[in-house]
């Protein structure tokens, strides 16, 4: 699995490269700014891009804006935003587009290497991974009316869904049965008016409904 890393900190960039190589990934390029990221993606066409939000020259939002560009140009390439910050405007835009192969994690909350590598593989395979703190911050700013219909337990379930947990994982975390989780999930779909369709991933759409309304 080929990866391009975009991170302006030399130590973190090299550390990520070594970590990914040790985890079985092939690091096609590791670059320090947004322009170099787009050039590297054009050259190597990786399976996954790991990008920081704030990069040179202004260290504001160059990284995530580059992520939006590459998702438009190469929609088949997965993107994991790994940052210390939640850039609300662009995060919402990124997560409101095609939902497969997208992740947004905060660096300070990545504490387990094995779990982090699993997240990378999941996103590269077309899944989604949203840090619960990212979801929480975006919800405060973009809280949709349909969420008012959800119970406190359904909100807990939806938050765990946003972390990529399966029904079994949610059941273990909340100490309830998988049957109860399934009922909560179906209730969430109903209250958010997400009907079953072969072309849609309702679990991801339920999380994105938090951000779009």
Image (cartoon, grey):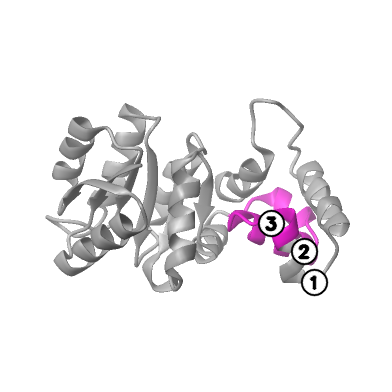
- Nearer to me, 204 or 26: 26
Callout 1 crowding tier (Cα within 10 Å): few <14, some 14–19, many ≥20: few
| Mark whose residue sits in front, 1 or 3 | 1
Callout 3 crowding tier (Cα within 10 Å): few <14, some 14–19, many ≥20: many
* Residue 175, disc: 1
**Image height check: is 17 above or below 200?**
below
Q: Number of labelled discs? A: 3
Queried whether the magenta region covers residue 136, the answer comes back as: no
Callout 2 crowding tier (Cα within 10 Å): few <14, some 14–19, many ≥20: some
Q: Residue at x 29, y 55 (%)?
A: 21
Along the horizontal axis of the image, is 196 left or right of 128? right
**Distance (Cα) linking label 1 and label 2:** 6 Å
Q: Contact, CB < 8 Å: mark 1 with mark 3?
A: no
- Nearer to me, 30 or 94: 30
Give residue 131's position: percent from left, percent from top. 50, 61
Q: Earlier in the sequence, mark 2 or mark 3?
A: 3
- Nearer to me, 149 or 157: 157
| Helix, strand or loop at mark 2 | helix
* Main secondary structure along the magenta-highlighted residues: helix
Give residue 168's position: percent from left, percent from top. 74, 58
Q: Quadrant of residue 200?
A: top right
| Helix, strand or loop at mark 3 | helix
Q: Residue at x 43, y 58 (%)?
A: 117
Q: Which residue is mark 3?
A: 158
Q: Which residue is mark 2?
A: 171
Q: Earlier in the sequence, mark 1 or mark 3?
A: 3
Tell me where the magenta segment starts and ends, as one range: 143-169
Give residue 130's position: percent from left, percent from top. 51, 55
Along the horizontal axis of the image, is 93 left or right of 210? left
Q: Which quarter of the rendered picture does the C terminus lie within?
A: top right
Q: Residue at x 76, y 38 (%)?
A: 193
Q: Which quarter of the rendered picture does the N terminus lie within?
A: top left
């Amino acid at each position: 699995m080929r990866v391009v890393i975009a991170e302006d900190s030399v130590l973190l960039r090299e550390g990520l490269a070594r970590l990914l190589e040790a985890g079985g990934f092939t690091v096609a390029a590791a670059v320090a700014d947004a322009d170099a990221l787009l050039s590297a993606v054009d050259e190597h066409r990786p399976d996954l891009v790991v990008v920081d939000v704030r990069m040179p020259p202004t260290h504001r939002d160059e990284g995530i804006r580059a992520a939006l560009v590459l998702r438009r140009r190469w929609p088949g390439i997965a993107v994991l935003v790994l940052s210390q910050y939640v850039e609300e405007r662009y995060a919402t835009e990124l997560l409101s587009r095609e939902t497969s192969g997208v992740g947004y994690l905060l660096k300070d909350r990545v504490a387990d290497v094995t779990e982090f590598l699993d997240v990378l593989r999941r996103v590269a395979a077309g899944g989604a991974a949203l840090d619960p703190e990212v979801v929480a911050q975006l919800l405060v700013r973009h809280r949709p009316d349909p969420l008012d219909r959800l119970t406190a337990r359904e909100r807990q379930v939806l938050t765990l869904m946003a972390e990529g947990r399966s029904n079994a994982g949610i059941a273990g975390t909340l100490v309830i049965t998988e049957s109860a989780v399934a009922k909560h999930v179906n209730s969430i779909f109903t209250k958010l008016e997400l009907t079953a369709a072969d072309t849609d991933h309702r679990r991801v759409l339920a999380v994105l409904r938090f951000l779009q309304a």
